[in-house]
Image (tube, helix red, strand yellow):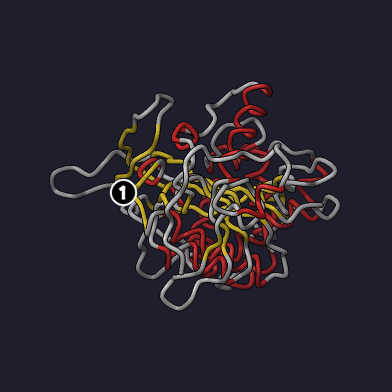
Amino acid sequence: MSARIEALLPIGVRPRQLQVRTLLLGMLIALSDDRPAHLKRVHQALIGLGEADKRRLSVIAQWKSAPHELTYRQVERTFHLIVEALGKEQPDGAPSQALSEVMDALIEASVEVLPVPGSSSYAIDWSGYESFARPPRKDGRCADAEASWGHRNVNHPGRSETFFGYYLQAATIVKEEKGACEVAELVRRITLSSARHDPPKQITPVIKRMHQDGIALGDLLADSGYSYREDGSFASPLRALRAKLVMDLHPNDRGMKGTHEGAIIANGALYCPATPKALFELSPLAPGASDEQAKEHDRRCGELHRYKLSALTASDEEGYRRVLCPAAAGKLRCPLRASSMALSHERPTPLCQCRVRRS
């Protein structure tokens, strides 16, 4: 990948002493102590290498008069050329195609050093990161023109705050739902964009490139921040890639939302009108829930699923599809379905008769 970036840089009259691969190595060394990779620290990391490494990486180069040690100005120059080559002519806060491809290759290289991941499931999420610069003044001037105001959640229920900066998104490998063994939860893709851009729209092309690179897409886990978006910008394009979206419902979509021809609309689906109302009050598990709480939550979710109307057909062009009564599907016992009463008593039996309109 360093050779690919090097090919994008202009060729001067005199060859550059600092190559792209050496600069990238210096950044990694500077980042190894969890501090920002400022160019000054990158330069210090490179000149702090052993004599043999410095000569191998051209940190010390033989000039006509004498050996020459890399200077900070040379580090700054190479970095500036890379920024020019991978940036956009008109910066808009989103990465260019060239920068996106370089980021994909660099992250993928960190995964390829290990065995092939044993999972095709991924979790995606975004975090807000503040810019190094202060927000714009009244005259609109700012040292970081691509940063923007955004919102992020804080560690307090129902609270959020504004910040000036960017959204960082990552796609992380996670264990298959029915996977037999654990997998290394490695980050496989990263993208950074200004807070003025909608995060789901920015991660969609990243997932598309994963598919184009031959990476299998299975379950794709996302929180309610991704589910409460326009269908055409996130869900539909990814379903077209055969990714199975597992998304948390937004609070505005949870619970009972009315009826449709007798069936209860809840949590984005249709349920039998005889469903116990207590089951509609289920909410996501709180962070740090115990194993016992998780098992009880799963049990109640499974009970609620028995009352859900099952899909009979795929959605048509207008988004409509036929559904089947849960008793007819064998998920519960109902006096209105005589055949269902022969099922095991382990299945629930509604206490009241439903009046769902049948087509």
Q: Quadrant of residue 339?
A: bottom right
Above/below status of 124 relative to 85: above
Above/below status of 323 relative to 119: below
Above/below status of 329 relative to 160: below
Q: Amino acid at mark 1?
A: Ser
Q: Secondary structure at mark 1?
A: strand
Residue depicted at 38% across the width and 52% down the height: 194
Please name the residue that numbered disc 1 is placed on.
148
Residue 42 location (% of width, % of height):
60, 42
**With 338 as the anchor, is 280 left or right in this view?**
left
Residue 237 location (% of width, % of height):
51, 69
The residue at the far bottom in this view is: 317
> Which image quarter is the N terminus in?
bottom right
Residue depicted at 71% across the width and 47% down the height: 343
8 or 60: nearer the viewer: 8
Q: Quadrant of residue 198?
A: bottom left
Residue 74 location (% of width, % of height):
56, 53
Residue 226 location (% of width, % of height):
46, 51
The residue at the far left in this view is: 138
Q: Residues within 10 Å of mark 1 (few under 14, many from 20)?
A: many
146 or 291: nearer the viewer: 291
User: Looking at the image, how many numbered discs can be counted on the residues?
Assistant: 1
Q: Quadrant of residue 303?
A: top right
238 or 263: nearer the viewer: 263
